[in-house]
Image (cartoon, rainbow, N blue to C red):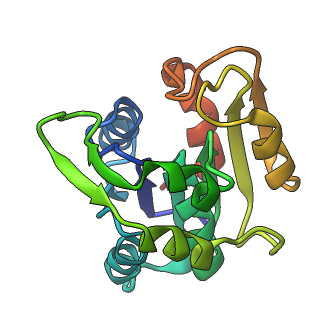
Amino acid sequence: MPNTHLLYLHGFRSSPQSAKARLVAAHVAAHHPAVHFWAPQLPPSPRAAMALVAQGIADWPHTAMAVVGSSLGGFYASWVARQAGCPSVLLNPAVHPARDLARHIGEQTAWHDPQERFFFLPEYVDELRALDQRGLPPGGPELAIIAKGDEVLDWREMVARYPQAQLRLLEGGDHGLSDFADHLPTVMQFLQLA
């Protein structure tokens, strides 16, 4: 059965204005106009972010939805996929965000609008720990696109975290997957959109 609903989750300090989010949105609009696409702006609190998502997809048909997540959004996508039992696409997914983001406590700027500031609070680290799905079976089929050239996250940790995923391991590349347009056909084939 084709998927009629698609969720896109951006990464830390990112937004639905990211290049990858915009590419996915444009592709869905052009080639899958019947698909309901949602890329919410996630609040800095992981608990609040997942509450927003859970509320937003509460009426979605879980048997006909999928989720794409980049970096921290990939970590979130694993949580959503477990709750909904749906397929997920993970783009350089964060594996240990509680560990990695602990050093980012304090004021942060938004990547796409440096004028926009937010605070990453100490309690958010515990909220991330509470969402960790490591060691649990995946909620559905997974596709992981991981760049060995990621300058933010360790590709070996990402590969080890997703042993059941259909893996596309890129030689080189970068954290933002600046060549994402090249991988869009693979992503869309995996998502099986209506």
Q: Is residue 108 visible?
A: yes
Seen from the viewer's position, the closer of residues 55 and 98 is: 98
Q: How many marks?
A: 0
Image quadrant assignment for residue 110: top left
Measured as percent of width and height from the top left, residue 55 is found at 33, 83
Judge from the rendering whether residue 101 lies leftward or rightward of residue 20; answer left or right: right
| Residue 178 location (% of width, % of height) | 49, 19
Residue 162: in sight, yes or no? no
* Residue at point 42%, 48% (across, down): 12
* In front of the other: 153 or 174: 153
Looking at the image, is 164 positioned above or below residue 114?
Answer: below
Left of 3 or right of it: where is 86? Answer: right
Picture coordinates of residue 147, whole percent (x, y):
69, 26
Quadrant location of the N terminus? bottom right
Observer-nearest residue: 7 or 170? 170
The quarter holding residue 24 reads top left
Q: Quadrant of residue 138?
A: bottom right
Q: Residue at x 37, y 85 (%)?
A: 59
Vertical relation: 152 (above or below) 165: above
The answer to whether 98 is drawn above or below residue 190 in the figure is: below
Residue at the outermost left position: 115
In x, y percent, where is residue 16? 29, 46
The residue lying at 56 percent from left, 19 percent from top is: 182
Nearer-the-camera pick, 145 or 107: 107
Q: Is residue 163 left or right of residue 117?
A: right
**Seen from this angle, which residue lies furthest top?**
172
